[in-house]
Image (tube, grey):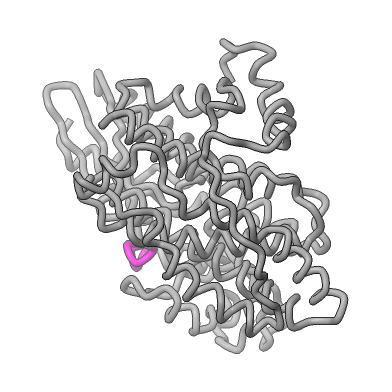
Amino acid sequence: MTPEEAWRILDEIKDPEIPVVSIVEMGMLRHVEIEDQTVTVTIAPTFVGCPAIQVIQEHVTRSLEEAGAATVNVRFTYSPPWSSDAITPEGREKLRDFGLSPPQTHQGLIEIALLDPAACPYCDSTNTSMRNSFGPTLCRSIHYCNNCQQPFEAFKPL
Amino acid sequence: MKTALREYLLALADDELILGHRASEWCGHAPILEEDIAFANLALDEIGHASLWYSVLAEIEEQDPAVYPDRLAYFREPQDFRNIQMVELPKGDWAFTIMRQYLFDAYEQVRLEALSQSGYEILAQVAMKIRQEEFYHYRHSSAWVRRLGAGTQESQRRMQIALDELWAYTGQLFQPIAGESELIQAGYVIASENLKDKWQDKVYPTLIESSLVIPATPQLHMNRQTHTHHLEVLLSEMQSVARLEAEANW
């Protein structure tokens, strides 16, 4: 297995809470190292308390083993911490199609990014208001679109 | 050095775990649906942060990071916990819950900001990561303090009672953690008492803006080894299932 092959395989692994976006598109996959038959994968977790992390770890291990890796090590890194700015343009597009407004890019200034209202994933209007900065998963907030009068969810900038 | 790191990490983690448990008690009981969702999220975040700090300790003590957090959470006795007393107090009414969450969130922003500069790399990395997430908590609880403090007469009255009850306990936030001086010398942490001014700079204006009076009661200075009986009650419930079958594979 080459690192390129491993990246291709890992690009099939989805975040179980957002089953349309892969961990590569989420910007979670940092590094793949292959030595003989041992593959070491470094992942940057999104939200620390996210229960999906363990599931992702299991999926990574299983899919690389099925592709012929003898041993798979999954490591977590917080340096630098995962940022929602790392979500790829394809990933952002898929989030929107899924009905989740992609996070505002913030370059570390989340407080300022939050001044911009989330764009409605249905009608693209920014005439929206945040109803709850907490939602059905740690990474989501709940909003309302004043234009098309739909409630919607957004991925939180982090 | 290992003992001092253990004390410090347990202080960070146990505060999160116990406050997270108290937050989880609102699940299904919060006054409005949005807050039911919010407090379930807060609980999940806090408990996740506790687990991460415990796994940092696992690396230092050469324990299995997949198992050790559960061992520490479910199989220690009350006297082995290093959380402050403020987080173990029963959840009280909504005003008490909001006020406690706010006073703690503000403190945590200050503590984690300082820790992000730690000379001990993993401490700095994890503090920076957790602080980003905790920012949402701080934002949420401070908005609620303003809303209730400057709300109706009844909400203001309840917020003032909560603040009066909690004030004495805030002294413990800035008490030195056992072994702290060793970590200060190594450039890993700054003195806990040096966090107090920054905390006051955050908290005082918000409380005053929210029509609340800063209590004149003295702040207590007990160490983190002393607990109220509430911790024992909390743990006996929280730990009961895990202890039924200690070796169970979940």
Name the spot of residue B43 as percent of width and height, x first: 62, 48
For residue A88: magenta?
Answer: yes
Q: Quadrant of residue B47?
A: top right
Classified by dominant secondary structure, the portion drawn in magenta counts as helix
In the image, residue A104 above or below residue B9: below
Judged left or right of residue B233, residue A91 is left
Between A108 and B232, the one nearer to me in the picture: B232
What residue appears at the point 37 percent right and 48 percent down from the top-left corner?
Answer: A23
In the image, residue B182 above or below residue B97: above
Q: Quadrant of the N terminus of chain A?
A: top left
In the image, residue A156 above or below residue B117: below
Q: Quadrant of the C terminus of chain A?
A: bottom left
Q: Is residue A8 visible?
A: no
Between A21 and A111, the one nearer to me in the picture: A111
Name the spot of residue B56 as percent of width and height, x first: 35, 35
What residue appears at the point 40 percent right and 35 percent down from the top-left corner?
Answer: B7
Name the spot of residue A149 as percent of width and height, x first: 72, 82
For residue A13: magenta?
Answer: no
Q: Is residue A114 visible?
A: yes
Between B231 and B185, the one nearer to me in the picture: B185
Which stretch did the figure color magenta?
Answer: A84-90
Judged left or right of residue B169, residue B72 is left
Which residue ends up furthest to the left in the rendered image?
A: A36
Between A59 and B11, the one nearer to me in the picture: B11
Judged left or right of residue A65, residue A3 is left
In the image, residue B189 above or below residue B72: below
What residue appears at the point 56 percent right and 22 percent down from the top-left corner?
Answer: B76
